[in-house]
Structures are given as C-alpha cells and as structure tokens.
Image (spheres, rainbow, N blue to C red):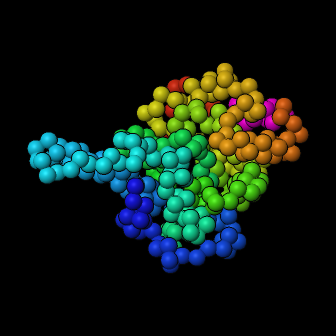
C-alpha cells in the first residue's frame, strides 16, 4: 500500500510541513470532524479496492497478450476490512513515524476542533464499508442531523491518541471522557461487552457523570433485548474481558480496583450500569441515540 499516495489523495498535511510537541494540544482537545474522518477512511477503502481492480485487469490481460507481465499481488487481502486493528500498524504508525505524533497532527487545521463526543469502540469493529453498517455510520448521521448546533467533532483513539506513546492510558481515558462529557458506544454487536477497554470507558463515563449514547442500526439483529441477554448470560467478571495488549489489561484492572475498591466491586457496579442503560424490551431496536 502506497501510504504517500493515500496521504496526497486524502489531503493530509505534508509531513515536512508538520511539527509536533506532545503537550501543545491537550489530549482531551484533539477532536476531528467526523465527516472528514468518514471521507478519509472511505478513500482508504477505495484505494485498496483499486489495487485489486488493477491486479484483476492485468491478470486478465496476461491471458491474451504475451508481453503483459504477471501482476504483483496486492499487499493486503481482497476486501480488507477497515478496522483500527488494520489501520494502526499499516497506516497510522507509518504516516506519523517521523513526527512521533498522533494522526491528529497531519489532519488539516480546518478539520480539527474541540471534541464533544468520545467514541468507544473495539479494535475489531469495521469503521467504514461500502455495503455494511459500521461504527462511524450512526455517528456521522447523528452529527449531520443534529439540531443543537454542536460542532461535529469526535475524540477517537486512532486519531487523537499518540500511538507511539503508551503511558497511563487508563487514567488518560478517564480524564478525557470527563473533559468531553459525552461518550457514544456504537453497538454493532455484543463484542464491546467482552472488551475491557469498552467496559472501562463505559464505567469512566458513569463515574464522571458523563452522558452515554448507544447507537445501533435498525437493520441489525442485535436489538436491545438481544444485547442485554448476551450480557446477562455471558458476563462473569471484568477480569475475563480481553485486551489486545496484556499490559493494558493489568493497567485497566488496577485502575478499576483503585476506583471501585476491588474487582468484585467493579463487577457489581458494571452490572447495575448495564441494567440501567439497556432496556429489556426486545422489540425496540437502538435506531436512535439513547442516554
């Protein structure tokens, strides 16, 4: 994948025109215009599709013309999903390696702003797709339809957090959520309840008295009742929840103990939070934001 071509195609600031000092912009102030991010990721997705289309066209040409060489296989699989787990190592880190900065540093200034929404998500969730409901769809739609005049800026870790640094991440998230005052959880499926980061961020929102909005597509089979049922049947303890990095799990569990006194105390508090936040009426899909 030609990351320089993607940077030029998507209008990122040239690396030589950027500078970064970590404390220049407070972590909680690093928001990105959600429609810009949505468009950027769609262009990344399109770039990967174009690589496979060129491969297919050249492969067909080799069947008819002896002088056409065999095409080089694209670096990434066909129909690669645009997830944080894919973007961080393959795009975000390479685009910011020289600066040692968050992706935020390369976003044009007119698309940066103080965020009014913290996006909680799993690293496996698809952010954009041409033919499926994804993490950013309901957020972008809600921002466009907003009647309250809020600036459509979001805090999302792939943009706002410096992926070259890993210090006090759990306490950082609590401070960021408290500063922003509103968290959204795109519930594409029940996966967030198995991920320790999502559980911690939800708890942070509650203890800091931040608003929580849960988004789900009306076309999804995962309605409120289903997700609540999955949680009540499958949840045993936050200690069973997963993180991508083992050290993250240790840090978050320690933060939970410091906040709630024990793992058992955290489990009890979380169960109350989920029961309060999710209705048990299975015939009401989350097709609108809920608080």
Is residue 272 magenta-colored? yes
Q: Residue furthest top?
A: 233
- Residue 157 is drawn in which quadrant? bottom right
- Residue 166 is drawn in which quadrant? bottom right
Q: What secondary structure predominates along the stretch shown in magenta?
A: helix
Range of residues picked out in magenta: 265-277
- Residue 267 is drawn in which quadrant? top right
User: Residue at image x 68%, y 59%?
Assistant: 165
Left or right: 110 in relation to 251 = left
Image quadrant occupied by the N terminus? bottom left
- In percent of width and height, residue 174 lies at 74, 53
User: Residue at image x 76%, y 33%?
Assistant: 239
Q: Residue furthest bottom?
A: 17
Q: Nearer the viewer, residue 32 or 138?
A: 32
Left or right: 138 in relation to 59 = right
- In percent of width and height, residue 225 lies at 58, 26
- In percent of width and height, residue 277 lies at 67, 36
The answer to whether residue 252 is visible is no
Left or right: 46 in relation to 115 = left
The answer to whether residue 195 is visible is yes
Q: Is residue 29 above or below residue 192?
A: below
User: Residue at image x 57%, y 44%?
Assistant: 123
């Amino acid at each position: 994948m030609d990351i320089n071509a993607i940077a030029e195609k998507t209008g990122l600031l040239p690396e030589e025109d950027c500078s970064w000092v970590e404390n220049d912009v407070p972590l909680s102030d690093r928001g990105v215009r959600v429609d810009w991010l949505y468009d950027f990721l769609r262009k990344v997705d399109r770039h990967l599709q174009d690589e496979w289309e060129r491969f297919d066209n050249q492969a067909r040409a080799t069947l008819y013309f002896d002088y056409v060489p065999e095409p080089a296989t694209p670096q990434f699989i066909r129909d690669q999903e645009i997830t944080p787990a894919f973007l961080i190592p393959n795009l975000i880190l390479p685009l910011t390696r020289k600066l040692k900065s968050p992706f935020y540093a390369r976003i044009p200034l007119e698309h940066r702003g103080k965020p009014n929404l913290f996006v909680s998500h799993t690293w496996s969730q698809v952010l954009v797709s041409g033919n499926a409901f994804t993490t950013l769809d309901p957020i972008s739609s809600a921002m466009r339809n907003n009647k309250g005049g809020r600036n459509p800026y979001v805090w999302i870790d792939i943009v706002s957090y410096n992926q070259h640094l890993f210090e006090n991440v759990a306490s950082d998230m609590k401070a960021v959520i408290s500063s922003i005052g509103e968290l959204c959880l795109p519930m594409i499926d029940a996966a967030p309840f198995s991920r320790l980061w999502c559980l911690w961020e939800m708890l942070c929102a509650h203890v800091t008295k931040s608003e929580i909005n849960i988004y789900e597509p009306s076309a999804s089979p995962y309605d409120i009742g289903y997700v609540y049922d999955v949680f009540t049947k499958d949840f045993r303890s936050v200690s069973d929840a997963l993180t991508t990095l083992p050290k993250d799990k240790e840090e978050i569990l320690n933060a939970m103990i410091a906040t709630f006194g024990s793992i058992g105390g955290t489990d009890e508090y979380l169960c109350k939070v989920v029961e309060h936040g999710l209705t048990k009426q299975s015939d009401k899909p989350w097709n609108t934001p809920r608080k």
